[in-house]
Image (cartoon, rainbow, N blue to C red):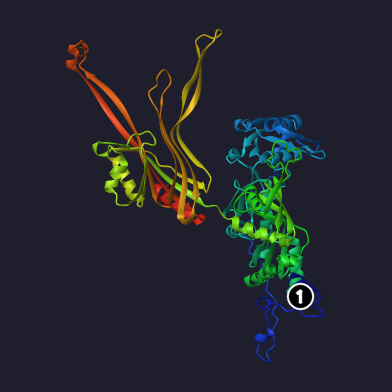
């Protein structure tokens, strides 16, 4: 079909091209009464409304100005290492080769990964620092500038470091660390630009974008590569010619953006459509966004945008693209390239090579910055090579458009937003009196009509006949009302009420407590007087971790690990740690509550009261003193309510509900 279409386009002089009905241009003559002349009206160009611009004349024009304090220039340097420990690589690269002052975070020092880097020819020192940063990024390690010293930190700590501030005209000569850029808008409002850009520019997890209406500007925080992509799109839409026009960005599947633009120009010209060569000229304007492999289309109205969209859909097919060997880049939207690539490889073929995005031991041929894995896939008899590009979170394919079609359809089905689970937990200590000696579960059995399931592992935890029990309830509010009523009367104490959000099949953990020093060993030495003691630190308090798995039918499988530990009175400088913990796997319906109970503890307290002097008389003193032994039995109760979050709107709704409930 695609071959026929192209042949018709090139032979339209001898054989008129017939458009499909939904793509046919409007016939104006058919809408005019007989004898009525068609009037040609010249378009009236309205000067665009120029919004107040932000003065950036005093801003820095170099995003690397902060990093130039390091004194790196264009002197040629090289660095080649094979299977070198990460910390040794940092010392060699930053200290020995680049002669920089730097510090290494303890978390990075604890890493034991191996690094392989090969540079074929010497490069400028400042470029080598860029390369080193890219290598470290593969191990979740980044660089930050603190004064005149480099700090080597885990990626998790970089989010709290202030970014380098630059202006909109900054040159990204170096890319270390986070950068904050303010982009003033001349012809667009911040809200309009935000709505447009957010649809087509994907920023990283640690990047952000916001609008400043007072300055009529956008504020973006990210790394240099992210800011370059963002700025290129903003510059395309913030033009006088775009004012009052419909603008849309399209990302072709089987073509490069430049190729599909040329096809569109050739095709639309045969229909008599005016193609604008510049953004200021009238007609349909087509522009390539190289960083996104996309094309920007600007037209006088939405109808023409939809018409161009139809043509793009007709041209962007495997049949039109043909059997030519091409490269295709799939930008992963909702997962990681490594995870998605593993699924595709398992379905259509096997991995056959590993490279050094995260280098494997013994792989001496890996090159830093290269993709992390490649595979040869079989799709309908044709071969398609896949490479996992972890630094850019993308999958790169080489093959024909027809072979890529099947893989693309699979990617669209599996690259979907991951479900999340919001877990509400209430941990309470309930005092067991004469009517509750068998545990809280029995009290709720007799008073809650919403209970629909009871399970137990009697004696499974060594707690006697009460054992470990859990109960599922329909009405979580009714159960919480009883727990809160007990707490009000002094019969229960709420230990913790955490709320945790976790991605499907990912662990979430919260810990509230203190570290207690415990003597681990005691030694004596002839050279040192006294006893030498070694201490270890034990975590105490409330510790909760869980891993959710979302199942069909709105059910959630939960692997729960709950621990409550309290230090007791110190004995010989070593306090005992009283611990009550639960490790279990259970299934709960979204929005319904599971109760875990049966963790019963008993403590005895002894108090003595006496009359001074008289109470100390042997034998007769018993008449003037009183000894009281009090036994206190409590049960730890855990209420768990999972909520499946399937969309960002649902998450925002729940967050707002909790915010209003908490009054903040």
Q: Against 640, is 604 above or below? A: above
Instruction: Tell me where residue 431 appears, x and y as whole percent.
Output: 30, 36
Along the line of sight, which residue is nearer the eye, 307 or 523?
523
Along the line of sight, which residue is nearer the eye, 21 or 432?
432
Secondary structure found at label 1: helix
Along the line of sight, which residue is nearer the eye, 297 or 366?
366
Residue 238 visible to an observer of this rendering: no
Q: Against 227, is 132 above or below? A: above
Instruction: Tell me where residue 271 appears, x and y as whole percent.
Output: 74, 76
The residue depicted at 65 percent of the width and 32 percent of the height is: 112
Q: Which residue is mark 1?
A: 270
Q: Quadrant of residue 400?
A: bottom right
Left or right for 393, reference 79: left
Instruction: Tell me where residue 104 appears, x and y as whole percent.
Output: 64, 31
Along the line of sight, which residue is nearer the eye, 244 or 496?
496
**Number of marks in picture:** 1
Q: Against 590, is 613 above or below? A: above
Residue 534 visible to an observer of this rendering: yes
Residue farthest to the top? 526
Local packing at callout 1 (Cα closer than 10 Å; few below 14, some 14-19, many 20+) is some
Instruction: Tell me where residue 515 appears, x and y as whole percent.
Output: 47, 28
Q: Against 616, is 156 above or below? A: below
Image quarter of the N terminus: bottom right
The residue depicted at 75 percent of the width and 33 percent of the height is: 98
């Amino acid at each position: 079909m695609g071959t026929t279409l192209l042949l018709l386009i090139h032979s339209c002089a001898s054989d008129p091209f017939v458009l499909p009905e939904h793509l046919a241009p409007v016939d104006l003559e058919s809408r005019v009464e007989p004898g009525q002349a068609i009037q040609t009206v010249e378009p009236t160009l309205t000067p665009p409304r120029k919004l107040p611009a932000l003065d950036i004349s005093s801003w820095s024009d170099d995003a690397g100005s902060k990093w130039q304090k390091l004194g790196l220039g264009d002197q040629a340097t090289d660095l080649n290492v094979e299977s070198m420990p990460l910390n040794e690589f940092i010392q060699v690269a930053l200290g020995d080769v680049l002669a920089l002052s730097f510090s290494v975070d303890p978390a990075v020092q604890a890493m034991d990964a191996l690094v392989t880097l090969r540079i074929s020819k010497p490069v400028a020192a400042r470029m080598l620092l860029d390369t080193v940063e890219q290598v470290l990024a593969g191990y979740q390690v980044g660089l930050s500038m603190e004064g005149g010293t480099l700090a080597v930190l885990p990626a998790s700590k970089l989010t709290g470091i202030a970014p380098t501030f630059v202006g909109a005209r900054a040159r990204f000569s170096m890319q270390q660390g986070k950068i904050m850029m303010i982009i003033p808008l001349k012809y667009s409002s911040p809200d309009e630009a935000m709505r447009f850009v957010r649809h087509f520019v994907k920023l990283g997890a640690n990047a952000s974008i916001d609008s400043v209406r007072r300055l009529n500007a956008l504020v973006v925080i990210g790394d240099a590569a992210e800011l370059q992509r963002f700025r290129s799109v903003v510059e395309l839409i913030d033009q006088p010619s775009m004012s009052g026009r419909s603008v849309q960005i399209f990302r072709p599947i089987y073509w490069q953006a430049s190729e599909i633009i040329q096809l569109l120009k050739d095709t639309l010209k045969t229909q008599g459509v005016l193609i604008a060569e510049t953004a200021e000229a009238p007609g349909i304007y087509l522009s390539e966004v190289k960083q996104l492999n996309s094309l920007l289309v600007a037209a006088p109205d939405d109808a023409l945008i939809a018409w161009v969209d139809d043509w793009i859909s007709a041209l962007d097919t495997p049949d039109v693209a043909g059997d030519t060997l091409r490269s295709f880049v799939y930008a992963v939207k909702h997962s990681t390239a490594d995870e998605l690539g593993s699924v595709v490889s398992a379905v259509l073929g096997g991995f056959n090579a590993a490279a050094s995005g995260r280098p494997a031991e013994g792989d001496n041929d890996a090159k830093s910055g290269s993709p992390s894995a490649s595979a040869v896939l079989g799709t309908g008899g044709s071969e398609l090579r896949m490479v996992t590009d972890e630094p850019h979170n993308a999958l790169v394919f080489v093959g024909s458009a027809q072979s890529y079609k099947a893989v693309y359809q699979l990617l669209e089905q599996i690259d979907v937003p991951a479900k999340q689970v919001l877990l509400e937990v209430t941990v309470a200590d309930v005092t067991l009196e004469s009517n509750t000696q068998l545990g809280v579960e029995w009290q709720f059995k007799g008073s809650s009509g919403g209970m629909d399931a009871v399970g137990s592992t009697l004696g499974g935890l060594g707690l006697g006949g009460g054992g470990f029990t859990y109960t599922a309830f329909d009405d979580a509010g009714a159960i919480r009302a009883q727990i809160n009523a007990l707490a009000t009367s002094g019969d229960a104490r709420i230990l913790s009420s955490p709320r945790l959000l976790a991605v499907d099949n990912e662990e979430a953990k919260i810990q509230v407590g203190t570290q207690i020093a415990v003597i681990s060993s005691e030694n004596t030495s002839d050279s040192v007087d006294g006893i030498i003691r070694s201490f270890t630190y034990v975590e105490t308090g409330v510790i909760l971790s869980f891993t959710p798995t979302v199942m069909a039918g709105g059910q959630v499988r939960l692997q729960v690990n709950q621990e409550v530990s309290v230090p007791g009175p110190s004995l010989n400088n070593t306090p005992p740690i009283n611990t009550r913990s639960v490790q279990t796997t259970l299934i709960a319906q979204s929005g319904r509550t599971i109760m875990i109970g049966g963790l019963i503890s008993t403590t005895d307290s002894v108090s003595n009261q006496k009359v001074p002097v008289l109470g100390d008389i042997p034998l007769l003193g018993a008449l003037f003193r009183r000894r009281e032994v009090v036994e206190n039995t409590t049960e730890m109760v855990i209420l768990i309510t999972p909520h499946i979050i399937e969309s960002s709107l649902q998450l925002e709704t729940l967050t707002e509900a909790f915010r209003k409930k908490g009054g903040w």
